[in-house]
Amino acid sequence: MLNLNTIEKAAQRLENVVHHTPMSHAPILSDMTGLEIYIKKENLQRTGSFKLRGAFNKIASLIEKGQRNGVVAASAGNHAQGVAFAAKHFGIDGTIIMPESTPLTKVMGVRELGAEVILHGANYDEAYAHAVKYAEAHTQNFVHPFADEEVMAGQGTIALEMLGQTPQLDAIVVPVGGGGLISGIATAAKALKPEITIIGISAEGAPAMKQSYDARHPIDTTSVRTIADGIAVRDTSPMTLKHILEKVDIFDTVCEDEIANAILFLLERQKLLVEGAGSVGVAAVMHRHLMDLPRGSRVGILLSGGNIDVTMLSLIIEKGLMKSYRKMKLIITLVDKPGALMHLTEALREVQANIVQIGYDRTSTDLEFGDAHVTMALETKGREHQESIRAVLTREGFPFREEH
């Protein structure tokens, strides 16, 4: 059974294994929202994610029962590292089935923790099906990423820490994918403080659990598409849905732009690197999804992980700079003759536009003979600065268009 006793027992197993991650007041977010925001930095956990807690607790419970015949998991990310870490800790075999498209850095990260990696299937669901068959064929234990009460109990230890660090909390905001994390946290938090509000946040691009919560019965989806890959779960677990329906008070979703904005905000303003799944709680408060909470409510937001792909992070930063008027991209048409480019750069120097990238094209089929396209990326200082750049280009007679 998942209850406060099993979660407290999990905390004992994890005592000298996991970090008691910091819980800090966030004054900028608090001023933005009218709430008193506290952030739980589980992105600083060993292996970079809360997933270590559940995986370790599950495997520790197996070891206590004398089951040392090895463990198998299906994952392309955080759960894989948690299982690999725990298997190495207990000196048992760990096998992780990962989709064939898994980035090499994630594969190497799991192998460095001592687990065997088998690449199988085009997506997670195919890897999952193979992992279940593999575990049966090798008489090893399959460690589910969320639909397991020992895993949920391990995740629930976060609530013990949050309420120990900040006992005055009125609400806790939790990312939701498969539902194991919020099931454990809600169970512990409601047992310790029945009046606390538990809020689940998922991605619009992975709507199964939100739809199931609203309908009050499991609903599966045919596909998911979100940058919050840690909560990109296609199907609903009846086990976790049961706990969510009983204990979660509010459930909402955030869109991709809101998730990206939260990642960039946390990096730039809070100096924290947080993956998409870990940032959805901040996205919800930044974009006014929790306005029903009374002003001044003390809200704990869980940053569940920090293992973001660097390519995705680069894309988020680039788009964020464009949206915040700190970068603009132009295609400018020049007469292809000596001095034309110098004339352009002099005009840009007049308005202190910093050129960070430039290209010169005189062969495109849409160009008139004797013309050239100059593509430029400019570092800018806000909306008004960009308006002054447009004005000077127009004044100097340079035809241009912007890329967005």
Image (cartoon, grey):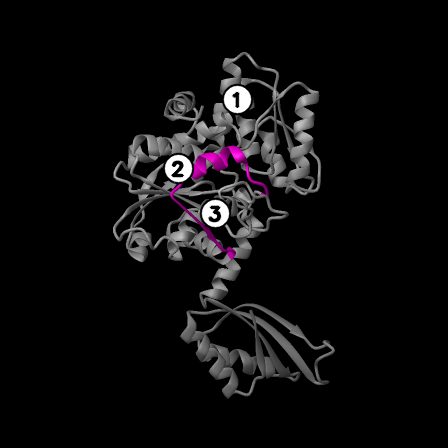
User: Judging from the image, what secondary structure is the residue with disc 1 in?
Assistant: helix
- In the image, what residue occupies the spot 49% across and 80% down? 390
Contact, mark 3 vs mark 2 (Cβ under 8 Å): no
> Spatial distance from mark 3 to mark 1, Cα to Cα?
34 Å
Please name the amino acid that badge 1 sits on: Ile
The one nearer the camera, 97 or 356, is: 97
Please name the amino acid that badge 2 sits on: Lys
Query: From this viewpoint, is residue 153 visible?
Result: yes
Q: Which residue is situated farthest in the top direction here?
A: 66
Query: From this viewpoint, is residue 180 visible?
Result: no
- In the image, what residue occupies the spot 41% across and 52% down? 284
- In the image, what residue occupies the spot 31% across and 39% down? 196
User: Judging from the image, what secondary structure is the residue with disc 2 in?
Assistant: helix
Image coordinates of residue 95 in percent, x first then y, are: 63, 26
Labels 3, 2: front one:
3
User: Judging from the image, what secondary structure is the residue with disc 3 in?
Assistant: helix
Q: Which residue is mark 1?
A: 59
Say above or below: 94 vs 394: above
Say above or below: 365 vs 278: below
Q: Earlier in the sequence, mark 3 or mark 2?
A: 3
Q: Earlier in the sequence, mark 3 or mark 1?
A: 1
Q: Which residues are magenta?
A: 234-256
The answer to whether 398 appears left or right of 27 in the picture is: right
Labels 2, 1: front one:
2
Mark 2, residues whose alpha carbon is within 10 Å: few (<14), some, or many (≥20)? many
Q: Which residue is mark 2?
A: 247
Labels 3, 1: front one:
3
